[in-house]
Image (cartoon, rainbow, N blue to C red):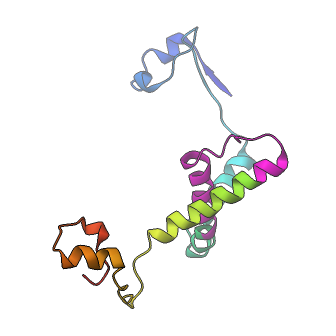
Amino acid sequence: MARFTKSQCRPCPARIQCTTTADSSCTVGLPPRELRDLQLRVRAKQQTPEWKTRYAVRSGVEGTVNEFAHGHGMRRCRYRGQGKAHIQHVLTAIAVNIERLSGLPPAEQTPTPRRPTAFQSYVDQREVPRLKSWRTLGN
């Protein structure tokens, strides 16, 4: 830990970038040499392709956990009791999977169009304009 007095801090050109304290003195925490050396080794290791490949798996998991916590309100349960909370988690996971699958690009094979329903045939015979969502895939 290094401490600097007001008189030492004031002439510093980087003073405006420092945080302020009640007595306007600066303290800088420096880790022990062993910890600093460990940090440098780990940061160097994190630049290797092997580490990045291994971390890619964890990154995907972390993204999913973040999506659950922030995107679907999973930090708090709506229900009391472990059983009900478990059901909430399972149903939310199913919903997220459905949401992800619906965003996938279509399969290479185009599906065969459905036959029109009796109502659609009736409307088509009378040439009644209808919403696009009423139409079958083939039309």
Bounds of the magenta segment: 57-86
**Is 88 in front, or is 36?**
88
Image quadrant in which you'd find residue 5 = top right
**Is 126 in front, or is 78?**
126
Does 27 lie within the magenta span?
A: no
Residue 17 seen in the figure: yes
- Point out residue 37 in the picture as x, y percentages from the top left corner: 68, 53
- Point out residue 34 in the picture as x, y percentages from the top left corner: 75, 49
**Is 133 in front, or is 77?**
133
**Is 74 in front, or is 113?**
113
Does 82 lie within the magenta span?
A: yes
- The answer to whether residue 15 is left or right of residue 60 is left
Residue in the picture at 40% in, 80% down:
106
Residue in the picture at 45% in, 14% down:
10
Residue in the picture at 84% in, 48% down:
82
Image quadrant in which you'd find residue 63 = bottom right
